[in-house]
Amino acid sequence: MTAEWQQSALDELAGRRFSLYPAIRGIEHNEWTLQRETWSEILIKNDTSGREIWIPRNHLGEISSSDSPVLILGLLRELEFKAGAVAPYRKVVLNMPETPAGRQAPPDVQPPEPPRNEFVKGSDAKTFKLLGIALSIGLTVALIGFVAVVVGFQNPFEYFFRPDTTTTDQRYLSLASTDGYHDIVIKMAAPEREQWITREEDELQFQALWYGSRSYIVILMGGARTGMRYIGTIHDPSRRVLDSAALAGGGDTSSLMRNLPDF
């Protein structure tokens, strides 16, 4: 993004409320106003807490072309607030220790003494049994390490015990960020249950439309309860994100979907 384009985009924020996408970790409310700017960073103020923070310009992305349901200022990377300032958020990744290709018998197991006469067969059987156990352990550890490297997640055991997120249909994939409540009812039929998952006085409103027989929940968001728009779908009951709505200025609502209020 050129400096001229960025300055022109920031001029659009003057005097207007906006939300950051993705939201800054460590700050509960995501509604801001622009206070002032320098050549290298901008100062924004949280409309709920009054907290002011500086954000370097090289973290700024595009501004949404529409403020329905809310004006969005995109961030090029996910940030977190700590020690009074923002910094790029870094996930902690646990590296699995390298495992040797093969294993010999455990060091505390002493090799059996040379068998004598009638005990030869019994000693050989015990030795082969110990070698078989050691080989099985080595192969198991190597398999876990392989899955951790190839699949690339923090806990390899989750790969084998992932929750079932199947649904009876995928009609939610036809929904878009411009769809309101009535558009969703036309495309999906009336929900089996509706629930406001935020208080009426909150700056951002979230509404859940339950389609329990289909195993998913459609989520709407807006600045007021009269202008709600579709932002995504989660699985019921695992609450895993099944779909995130694409934004007009680029990106999607996946960060919002991962940080929904508890309900």
Image (cartoon, grey):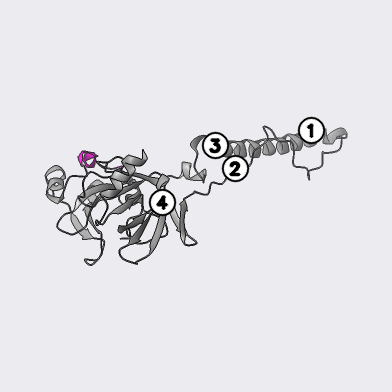
Q: Residues within 10 Å of mark 4 (few under 14, many from 20)?
A: some
Q: In this view, does 91 lie above or below 52?
A: above
Q: In this view, does 201 lie above or below 30?
A: below
Q: How far apart are marks 1 and 4 (CA)?
A: 79 Å
**Which numbered dot is residue 149?**
3
Give the camera-side residue of 114 and 34: 34
**Which numbered dot is residue 41?**
4
Helix, strand or loop under label 4: strand
Instruction: Name the residue beneath numbered marker 2.
Output: 96
Q: What residue type is labelled 1?
A: Lys
Asked if labels 2 and 3 touch by Cβ distance under 8 angstroms, the answer is yes
Q: Which amino acid does label 3 sit on?
A: Val
Helix, strand or loop under label 1: helix
Name the magenta segment's main secondary structure: loop
Q: Which amino acid does label 2 sit on?
A: Met
Q: How far apart are marks 1 and 3 (CA)?
A: 43 Å
- In percent of the image, x 14 and y 57: which residue is there? 226
Give percent across and percent down for residue 215: 27, 48
Between label 3 and label 4, give the one nearer the viewer: 4
- In percent of the image, x 29 and y 45: which residue is there? 9
Helix, strand or loop under label 3: helix
